[in-house]
Image (tube, rainbow, N blue to C red):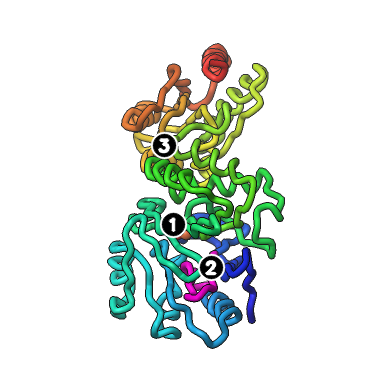
Amino acid sequence: MNCSREIISGVYWIGASDRRIELFENIFPVPEGMAYNAYLIEDEKTAIIDTVDSSVTRLYLENIKGIIGETAPDYLVVNHMEPDHCAGIEDLCQLYPQMKIVGNAKTFQYMSQFYSRNLSERFYEVKDGDTLNLGTHTLKFIFAPMVHWPEVMVTYVEDLHLLFSADAFGSFGALSGNLFADEMDINDFFWAEARRYYANIVGKYGVQVQSVLKKVLEVSVEMICPLHGPIWRRDFDTFINKYNLWSQYLPEKKGVLIAYGSIYGNTQAAAHILANQLAEKGIRDIRMLDASKTHMSYLISDIFKYSHLVLASPTYNSGIFPPMLNLIHDMAALGIRNRKVVLISNGTWAPTAHTAMQKMLAEMKEMEVITDPLLLKSAIKPEQMADVQRIAEKICDSLNR
Ligand code: FEO
């Protein structure tokens, strides 16, 4: 069977989608499945660009056969050695004994770590900026370390102005026949999934993403072919602009994310009262998420989106309620910064969640706690409404600045 597609003369998409997968990387929910893209360039020399996840390797190998039949590819370019893209390397080596593997020193280091078989005789090592002529087309290798692993490189086809961008510009979600973003309904759901993918997969590496963006913007790009999600051949300025914001930890929206943990509903009630006050003051962009029942990846994605953050937590084991503790820990691990924060803390006998949250936030960069926390003893009381008003006004003032 052959399910490949020619995306531009002589260049084929040879990837596949997996809708059985529940958790990408065994951690991130993918309700719409996952696409693993790979590509093949037919020229005087044939080059395959990356392999795929083991779940779809059979389809990938059939796609290759469907295009080149019994001939053999000359090169396999490995832009990324993470197993969702390198699971087919040994299969290809078995099928094509003469095929060279194009990568950098780190690519080959990780290859020898993942595989027992010695593939070193096939290695064709490239350095940043090196080129490889295939006949008509010339590939240029641009190193993109930490987007998302140290060995990552992107491959630019100079005459076609086509960029194989590795994990960059990828998204969660399977493909449904249409490969190009301009053939699809690129709606709010798509952008939410693209942001969730970025924030959780490469969100930690903003500085490195900025550096790759600079390199990419130096060359003329007419088509972006990522390893996940749709291919972009027009209107990708929106995506580049979003990458520019996300990688500088700049919010996309002036708005408020209220993330709360609540054991019996009392902390949640206070969070709702604050949300109502914000709404009455005309704030439109308010999002509330229960940290206990919202997967971390969605919370992190919305933290990348919004400028203001309310964190509400009961005190638990003399500290922060575990779902909220995990969230703040993940925020710190991903290097999130530059957000305005308000805290709500609850406790029946010793409310200390706010001091623990303040301590964690103080260790992060540019996380500004804009007012004193709302302190609850078990449940919010009528006399505390003025305090909620004070917090709502502070948030509004800060939003309007
Ligand atoms: Fe899609 Fe970093 O692998």
Q: Position of residue 31 (x, y in %)?
A: 61, 57
* Coordinates of residue 206 in the picture (x, y in percent): 41, 41
Q: Which quadrant of the view contains residue 117?
A: bottom left
Separation of marks 3 and 2 at Cα, in angstroms: 34 Å
On the image, numbered disc 2 is attached to which residue? 39
Which of the 4 image quarters holds residue 305? top right
Q: Residue at x 41, y 23 (%)?
A: 368
Of residues 45 and 303, the one drawn nearer to the viewer in this rendering: 45
Residue at point 58%, 15% (across, down): 382
Res. 208 image quadrant = top left
Cα separation between marks 3 and 1: 25 Å
Q: Residue at x 60, y 53 (%)?
A: 232
* Residue 336: numbered disc: 3
Front one among 282 and 268: 282
Q: How busy is the neighbourhood of tag 3: few (under 14 within 10 Å), some, or many (20 plus)?
A: many
- Mark closest to the chain's N terminus, 3 or 1: 1
Residue tagged 1: 154
Tag 2 or tag 3, which sits nearer the N-term?
2
The answer to whether residue 36 is seen in the rendering is yes
> Mark 1–mark 2 contact, CB under 8 Å?
no
| Residue in the picture at 49% in, 42% down | 300
